[in-house]
Structure formats: structure tokens, C-alpha cells
Image (cartoon, grey):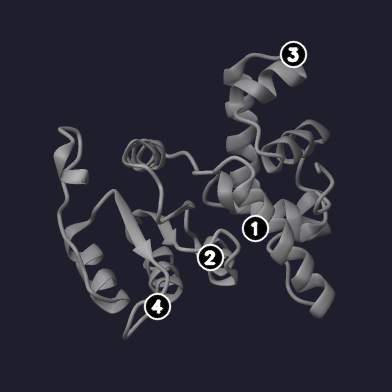
Amino acid sequence: MLDTRPDFTVVGTAPDGAEAVRLCRELRPDVVLMDVRMPVMDGIEATRQLADSGQTQPRVIILTTFDLDEYVYEALRAGASGFLLKDVTAERLFEAVRVVADGEALLAPGVTRRLISEFSALRRKSNPEADAALGPAGLRLLTPRETQVLRLVAEGLSNAEIAARLVVNEETVKTHVSRVLRKLGLRDRTQAVVAAYESGLVVPHAQR
């Protein structure tokens, strides 16, 4: 499907995670569509290895059969930029690749936030002392406005929606988001959402 679009070039395919990592290091793609369950090396470990490679990292979109899959949550924590269900429409797939290639995170309306909130709550309940991606010390690095912006990002709002909520222009929001990511050592908006839930800044189900 991707090869049918004039703005995409498929540079490689792989039957397992280990081969995917090898090909990515050789071919340097912009975006990777990563399955979760594969032989030799699963998609979570492959995503983690790509994120930790120290090279220019491709952005990873996880493909899964289940919208509430613990493995997908771990992949997001490992560095994936978002995820799609395997029954996604072709147009939605094309748009997702474009969004992620442009440097944005893929936050499927409701689904990604629900997944993150469910599993971050389960982690804290089963292991209250489990390490969080972002703790109180990290939050203290943020200004009150940056903390407010992070909370709104975690609610799934776009830059335009945050700008309207805070009555500022969109460029100001982009600056705040960039500063939040830099101060907290986060790669993109998806990791910011994970961090906000795991730190307790956003309480699971608070938006329901």
C-alpha cells in the first residue's frame, strides 16, 4: 500500500525484529512500521535497540491487533512514536506515516491515552516503587506554564487546541513543548504523555 503513494518509498522489509534493526542501521529509514510479535526478536526489543542506537533514529509506529496490549505500552516507553491497529484504513495509515515523519507523535484519539492510563495505573498498583519516566525532581525543572502545557499534551490536545485553551499563539505552544521535551530528556510527544501519566501529573481516567 505504501509503495502506491508518490511521496513514500519503501526501502526494506524484515521478517523479524533482529533483521529489522540490522536493516534500519544500514538503510536509515525515516519511519518504521513495527509489528509487536515476531520471531527471533520482538518489536519491543527492536524498538528499544533502535532508540538506544545513538544514530539518527527512525521514528517507529507500532502495529498491533489489540488496542489494549501491554506490549504496546512497553514499546511506547521504549521509544515508539505511536501505534496503529492492524485494521487501520489505508488513508489513516498514509496520514500516520506523514505525521510521524514530520516529527509529531501519533496519538490516536482516545485509544493511546486509554492504553497509557490503564497500564501506568497497573504498574503503580502492582509496584508502587517502580521507576517512573518522570518524577517530582523532573517536574521541578518546568515552569508553571510548561507544566500546564505538558498536562494538556497528555490530555491529547494538539498545539492549536492548546493555543486556543491558553489564549496564546501556536508558535508559543511549540516553544513550550520543545522546552518540556528538552528539559525532561524526552524524545517526542508520545514519551511526554507516558511520562505525565507515570509521574502522576495526569491521573488515569481523570478525563473520562
Classify residue 86 by image quadrant: bottom left
Seen from the viewer's position, the closer of residues 104 and 89 is 89
Residue located beneath label 3 in the image:
167
Mark 1 closeness class: few <14, some 14–19, many ≥20 residues within 10 Å = some
Disc 2 and disc 1 in contact, CB within 8 angstroms: yes
* Amino acid at the residue labelled 4: Asp
The answer to whether residue 98 is above or below residue 133 is above
Mark 2 closeness class: few <14, some 14–19, many ≥20 residues within 10 Å = many
Residue in the image at 19% along x and 33% along y: 7
| Helix, strand or loop at mark 2 | helix
* Amino acid at the residue labelled 3: Val
Distance between mark 3 and mark 1 Cα atoms: 30 Å
Report the disc number at residue 115.
1
Distance between mark 2 and mark 1 Cα atoms: 8 Å
Distance between mark 3 and mark 2 Cα atoms: 35 Å
Question: Of the residues under marks 4 and 2, which one precedes in the sequence?
Answer: 4
Is label 3 or label 1 in front? 1
Report the disc number at residue 42.
4
Question: Of the residues under marks 3 and 2, which one precedes in the sequence?
Answer: 2
Left or right: 7 as drawn, with respect to 167: left
Where residue 189 appears, x then y in whole percent? 57, 44
Where residue 39 appears, x then y in whole percent? 32, 83
Is label 3 or label 2 in front? 2
Q: Can residue 41 be seen in this view?
A: yes
Report the disc number at residue 72.
2
Distance between mark 1 and mark 4 Cα atoms: 19 Å
Disc 3 and disc 1 in contact, CB within 8 angstroms: no
* Amino acid at the residue labelled 1: Leu
| Helix, strand or loop at mark 4 | loop
